[in-house]
Image (cartoon, rainbow, N blue to C red):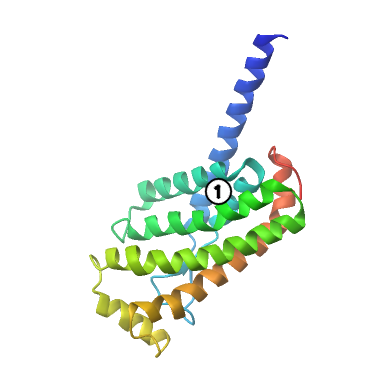
């Protein structure tokens, strides 16, 4: 066995992996700048972006760790370029909730790389994001966000969207959960369309 050749091939593989993670992270950072409010579901400080699409594609093609790295680099680059208007709370939320979506999806897809498994993975990821998003918002993110905005103001913003919102529990149940479900479905559909084309440039298999 030619050990030098094996080492060179391994080095090239690592360089390719890092280049692909970097490319997808850059794409996610650019996409993150374009946010869409969903005023019929949640207050304006909850905005939909498609930056999870490159992270999910990376998770499918390169594995869940790559997806997490893409999410992390995306957030760091975004904060370096634009700063944070939420004292880092919104950025932390984007990272944690994004990972709660892509990690289950990528793990399920990794078991058997087929279109059907990808769809199942994204469905599980969407539910995971909705559930974990509710827990994180209720116990971590919304309390942390009170540094910027009093809880009463947050709940009033929720009540303006849906009159049934009168507590943190109803806020996460009526506003946060539907918002994340819609986000998961939209991101999944976009990923499903794009993955088979982008994956040809990556080392992951096609669906």
Asked if residue 7 lies left or right of residue 94, the reply is right
Report the residue marked by disc 1. Answer: 27
Looking at this view, is 97 or 195 the one in front? 97
Number of numbered discs on residues = 1
Circle 1 — which element?
Answer: helix
Q: Quadrant of the N terminus?
A: top right
The residue carrying pointer 1 sits among few (fewer than 14), some (14 to 19) or many (20 or more) residues within 10 Å by Cα, namely some
Asked if residue 191 lies left or right of residue 160, the reply is right
* Picture residue at 54% right of the left edge, 63% below the top: 128
Q: Is residue 168 above or below residue 35?
A: below
Q: Is residue 174 above or below residue 163?
A: above
Asked if residue 36 lies left or right of residue 86, the reply is right
Looking at this view, is 69 or 133 the one in front? 133
Q: Is residue 193 above or below residue 204?
A: below
Q: Residue furthest bottom?
A: 163
Asked if residue 135 lies left or right of residue 26, the reply is left
* x and y, in percent, of residue 161 in the image: 42, 85
* x and y, in percent, of residue 92 in the image: 38, 55
What is the quadrant of residue 104 in the picture?
A: bottom right
* Picture residue at 24% right of the left edge, 66% below the top: 148
* x and y, in percent, of residue 169 in the image: 37, 78
* x and y, in percent, of residue 149 in the image: 25, 71
* Picture residue at 28% right of the left edge, 67% below the top: 143
* Picture residue at 31% right of the left edge, 61% below the top: 86
């Amino acid at each position: 066995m030619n050990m030098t050749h094996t080492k060179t091939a391994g080095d090239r593989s690592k360089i390719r992996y890092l280049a692909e993670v970097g490319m997808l992270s850059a794409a996610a950072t650019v996409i993150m700048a374009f946010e869409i409010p969903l005023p019929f579901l949640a207050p304006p400080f909850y905005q939909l972006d498609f930056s999870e699409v490159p992270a999910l594609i990376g998770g499918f093609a390169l594995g869940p760790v790559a997806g997490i790295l893409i999410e992390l680099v995306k957030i760091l680059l975004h904060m370096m370029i634009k700063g944070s208007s939420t004292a880092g709370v919104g950025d932390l939320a984007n990272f944690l909730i994004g990972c709660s979506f892509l990690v289950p999806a990528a793990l399920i897809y990794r078991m058997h790389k087929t279109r059907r498994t990808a769809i199942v993975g994204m469905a599980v990821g969407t539910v995971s994001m909705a559930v974990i998003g509710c827990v994180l918002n209720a116990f971590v993110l919304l309390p942390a966000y009170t540094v910027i905005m009093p809880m009463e103001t947050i709940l009033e913003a929720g009540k303006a969207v849906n009159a049934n919102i009168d507590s943190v529990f109803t806020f996460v149940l009526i506003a946060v959960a539907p918002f994340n479900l819609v986000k998961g479905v939209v991101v999944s559909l976009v990923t499903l369309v794009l993955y088979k084309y982008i994956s040809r440039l990556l080392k992951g298999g096609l669906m």
